[in-house]
Image (cartoon, helix red, strand yellow):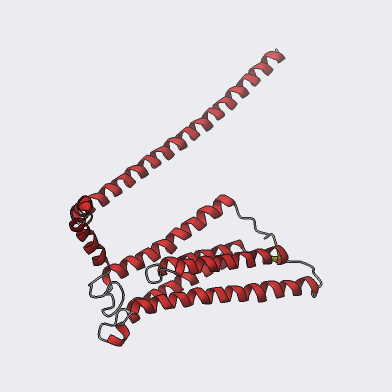
Amino acid sequence: MCQFCRNLLLKGCIFSVLCYQWLKKISGRKNEQNKQQCWETLVGQELYRLVLMDLLIAMSYIILAEFLWGLCIRNITLRKRKLEFDIARDVLELIYSQTLVWFGVLFSPLLPAVQIGKLFLLFYLKKTSLMMNFQPPRKHWKATQMNALFTKLLFFPSFAGALAFVIYTMWRVRPSSDCGPFSNLRSMLLLGKRWIRGLGRSNPSFVWLSWAYNNLVDNPLFLFTLVGLFLAIIYIHMQVLDGQKMIISRLQKQIDNEGEDKKFLIAKVQALNEASAQQ
């Protein structure tokens, strides 16, 4: 478990350093025009390099550390045993690969296709290595416990961190002025606003969509009201759950008390029967 936490912390530090590098060093230098040109392409290229390096490192590890090392353990050492399969490490690698896709889908639209091909290749390599070189781990993981833990890790910090990075980039970082679909805009979100507003003028059947965006989505009062309603629903739901937990604990205590009362009454009845039998 300590090794798993260390690997998770290492992955988080890697993504934090990458976000700092991309946002502050590449897209944040306003005075250096040569650094500002097509910074979206630079970020996309970096993500492609990360995916390809991850593939090369994973294949090298499978070939050198699993196939060759497993062959040495089985044929050279005196103890004929196989390696233990580390489920947590492999699942963490899948979460890392998925996070790379979420980070790069804005800058590299073809990155998910590359990642799918990479995962197909690694799947069959790992499957072959698993059947030949590994034995079941000594530590047994509960399926429900693993599912809950890895789902939480996939959502936070993986999905939440990537979503925060993409939203911040679209909202605050100025796009490149000489290339890309967002050139000559102050932010990437303005392209969506212009498209929705122009949609109602060009096609009368979509006037309602433009009205809904202008009066609801782009209205701070409506958004604050919606967020307040959502928080109120969450608060009420939490209070209901707390009340149900309190009722369950009281019912459990009542059942325990009734069990103690029954034991006391049975003991009294047995004592009276023994006393009457002696008389």
Looking at the rendered image, the quarter that the C terminus falls into is top right
Q: Name the image quarter holding residue 137.
A: bottom right
Residue for point 58% across, 51% down: 143
Name the one closer to the observer, 111 or 255. 111
Q: Judge left or right: residue 137 versus residue 24.
A: right
Q: Name the image quarter holding residue 240.
A: top left
Figure check: 187 above or below 159: below
What percent of the width, then of the height, locates residue 268? Answer: 61, 21
Name the one closer to the observer, 263 or 276. 263
Residue for point 41% across, 73% down: 16
Furthest residue in direction front, as rendered:
203
Q: Judge left or right: residue 10 versus residue 90.
A: left
Residue for point 51% across, 58% down: 150
Looking at the rendered image, the quarter that the N terminus falls into is bottom right
Residue 15 in view: yes
Residue for point 34% across, 79% down: 39
What percent of the width, then of the height, locates residue 250? Answer: 45, 35
Name the one closer to the observer, 253 or 12. 12
Residue 216 in view: no
Figure check: 260 above or below 202: above
